[in-house]
Amino acid sequence: MDLRGWLRFALGAGLAGAAGCSAPAGPPDVVLVVVDTLRADHLGSYGFALPTSPHVDRFAAESVLFERALAASANTVPSHASLMTSRFVREHSVGWINGTTRLEDAVTLAMRFREAGFETGAFVSNFVLRRAVGLDAGFDVYDDELDAAEPNRPDFTERNAEATTARARAWLARQSERPVFLFVHYQDPHGPYTPPPGWREPFAALEAESSPALPVLARDDAAGGIPRYQALPGLAHLAQYRSRYAGEIAYFDASFGRLLEALDARGRPNVVLLTADHGESFGENGFYLSHGHATTPDQAHVPFVLRAPGLAPERRSEPVHHVDVAPTLLELAGLAPPEDARGVALGPLLRGGRPLPERLLFCDVGTDVSAYAGDRFLRASRSEPRRAFQFSQQRWEGGRRWEPIPSEPADLERLDAYLAHAERMRPIPAALSKSDRARLRALGYLDDE
Ligand SMILES: [Zn+2]
């Protein structure tokens, strides 16, 4: 966009300076924050009763908050690939596999920002987002140096919110006048839930709730008990785990506040989008303290909070999805949304006070796929990759009973067409290192033995 184009855009979007100043401040900084495993319903701004999220809530009060936002997958890497490409899971080369496939042949959000002259930086906190999975494409800096390890899986490295935020803030402090595209991934609410000392105590009241005592399972991907990687010594009750999960969110939240401080200190306009890669089951459909196995709302529903110049704070109930992130952020920065985007740029609809289009939005973990629309979703699941899918439908808020389908034959046809996509997953070349294989096998992502 040339200067005249930018000026026209900026005036339309309300970016042209606060106090009637006629010169635009230039393209905004753009920041995408993704929190691993964060259930929307555990944030104050989404109705949680205890104070897990004062900084997110203050941010949300200045933002457009989407009450019904959906993840592309219930696994980390597939969701991130959809965030960066605006493609559904079966349409990118990561596919529904987590950690052994790689994003290739796609123009990513970071590539588009870099091409437009933005400085691009990424700071991730989970081993599965390491550079080898290809999400580094387009980033000048892709910081995946993880300095800590999970308690039950010492090979599985991660980084806490303070360490990741310190790196992101230091990078921001080194930037000059050019606008930035910054992607920060936080790992803290991902299990095992071990908030640093002092962060669990404000949520001790949750432990008074009666909850079942659960067995510790022998594996990480089964129902009916505590996955092995989640087990904490002496703790058997869901309520004990939930209080620690709440503490992890509060710990992340403080760092989110520090990140916003550093961003606002740059004195430029900025666009900030906060979401999660997926949710977490707390007993829904028999799954406890886990994700990656189902596309029901406990795992598919994520927060989605967008603050941008020219967007009035409001709450919206139409469904939005990870595929909307790339076109939305590009458009809010004055750049053209990708023509092949599967999502929509939300800015023009919000600025114009218009409703979002009705559409089917897919959450996909391979053997379980749901198509969300309005307040219901069609679900296709099968016990094994080569078996036929079984279809069912449910309301996604307050839904208790699975209902017969199809009530909307056209939707069923569209879900079928999505399922028929040829899977085009690309393995990470030259194989994984021995330790990578051991880690991924421990997670249940490799079945080669
Ligand atoms: Zn994740």
Image (cartoon, helix red, strand yellow):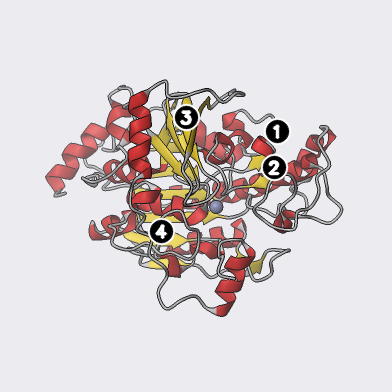
Amino acid on which the number 3 mark rests in the picture = Phe
Q: Residue at x 46, y 43 (%)?
A: 388
Q: Which residue is mark 3?
A: 377
Residue type of the residue flagged with mark 4: Val
- As rendered, which of 146 and 266 lies closer to the eye? 146
Task: Determine the residue positioned at 37% across, 61% down.
Answer: 103
- Front position among marks 4 and 1: 4
Horizontal and vertical percent for residue 76? 51, 54
Label 1's element?
loop
Percent of width and height locating residue 9: 20, 38
Mark 2 vs 3, N-terminal side: 2
Q: Which residue is mark 1?
A: 50
Q: Is mark 1 within 8 Å of ligand 1?
A: no
Q: Earlier in the sequence, mark 2 or mark 1?
A: 1
Tell whether label 1 touches label 2 (CB within 8 Å).
yes
Q: Position of residue 162 (x, y in %)?
A: 61, 58
- Which residue is identified by label 2? 246
Could you say which disc has been placed on residue 94 in the image? 4
Mark 2 to mark 3: distance in Å?
A: 28 Å
Q: Nearer the viewer, mark 2 or mark 3?
A: 3
For the residue marked with disc 1, what is the amino acid? Answer: Leu
- Using the numbered discs, state the Cα–Cα distance from disc 3 to disc 1 in whole angstroms: 29 Å
375 relative to 270, above or below = above
Q: Nearer the viewer, residue 98 or 330?
A: 98
